Image (cartoon, rainbow, N blue to C red):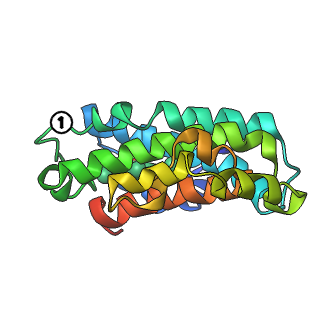
């Protein structure tokens, strides 16, 4: 929306500092920053729907979730080759010293995003879908409970996209965005 506005010097002052802090990024660092920004834009599109501030639209939620899923998992991790620490990256060295954890969180983002794409049709928690999804998740000895055998797994890690897909969309959305934060807490420099 800014793009259509002719930018004068004064108008530029109003844009976020972050947009400029990262000019000069090149190669794989620029690519991964752009991918992260695309995911952030997808989140901004659907967040108001999750909080009831915008009318809920399942197909918009689904396509945003699919966009995030496509940029997570292997597509995310391949943008972090060892030694890709060129300025102005905000990736911490921990990415490479704790690669397993980084990969796990990238995979978890893919699982939760795919789950949200399925959950999109369920609508919001308040819309009365909680009982069905609750029963789907708790009932029976199979499914989610089977995840216990993996031992030590966190809830989102032992849930498949299909299980997350039984949640209300806002629950799946929260699970997905918590994965963004979990990775940033550990692997991205604070601004
Ligand atoms: Cu950047």
Answer whether residue 26 is visible to the viewer in this image. Answer: no
Q: Residue at x 33, y 59 (%)?
A: 151
Give the residue number, with chain letter if any, for mark 1: 81
20 sits left or right of 128 in the view: left
| Residue 39 picture location, percent across and down | 53, 43
1 sits left or right of 180 in the view: right
Of residues 93 and 24, which is closer to you in this image?
Answer: 93
Q: From the image, which quarter does the N terminus lie in?
A: top right
Of residues 167 and 94, which is closer to you in this image?
Answer: 167
Q: Residue furthest front?
A: 141
Residue 143: quarter of image = top right
Q: From the image, which quarter does the C terminus lie in?
A: bottom left
Residue 2: quarter of image = top right
84 sits left or right of 176 in the view: left
| Residue 144 picture location, percent across and down | 53, 50
Mark 1 surroundings: few (<14), some (14-19) or many (≥20) residues within 10 A: few
Q: Residue at x 26, y 31 (%)?
A: 27
Q: Residue at x 28, y 59 (%)?
A: 187
In this rendering, the answer to whether 147 lies above or below 57 is below
- Where disc 1 sits, the SS reads loop
Residue 24: quarter of image = top left
In this rendering, the answer to whether 125 lies above or below 136 is below
Q: Residue at x 65, y 53 (%)?
A: 137
63 sits left or right of 93 in the view: right
| Residue 84 picture location, percent across and down | 16, 41
Answer whether residue 69 is visible to the viewer in this image. Answer: yes
């Amino acid at each position: 929306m800014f793009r259509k506005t002719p930018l004068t010097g004064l108008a530029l002052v109003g844009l976020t500092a972050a947009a400029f802090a990262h000019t000069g990024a090149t190669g794989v660092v620029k690519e991964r920053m752009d991918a992260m920004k695309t995911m952030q834009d997808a989140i901004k599109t659907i967040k108001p729907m999750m909080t009831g501030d915008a009318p809920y639209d399942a197909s918009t939620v689904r396509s945003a979730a699919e966009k995030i899923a496509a940029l997570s998992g292997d597509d995310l991790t391949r943008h972090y080759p060892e030694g890709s620490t060129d300025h102005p990256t905000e990736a911490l060295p921990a990415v490479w010293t704790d690669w397993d954890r980084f990969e796990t969180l990238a995979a978890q983002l893919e699982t939760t995003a795919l789950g949200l794409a399925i959950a999109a049709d369920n609508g919001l928690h308040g819309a009365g879908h909680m009982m069905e999804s609750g029963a789907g998740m708790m009932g029976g000895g199979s499914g989610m409970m089977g995840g216990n055998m993996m031992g030590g797994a966190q809830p989102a890690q032992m849930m498949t996209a299909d299980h997350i897909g039984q949640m209300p969309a806002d629950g799946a959305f929260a699970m997905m965005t918590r994965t963004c934060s979990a990775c940033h807490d550990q692997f991205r420099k604070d601004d």
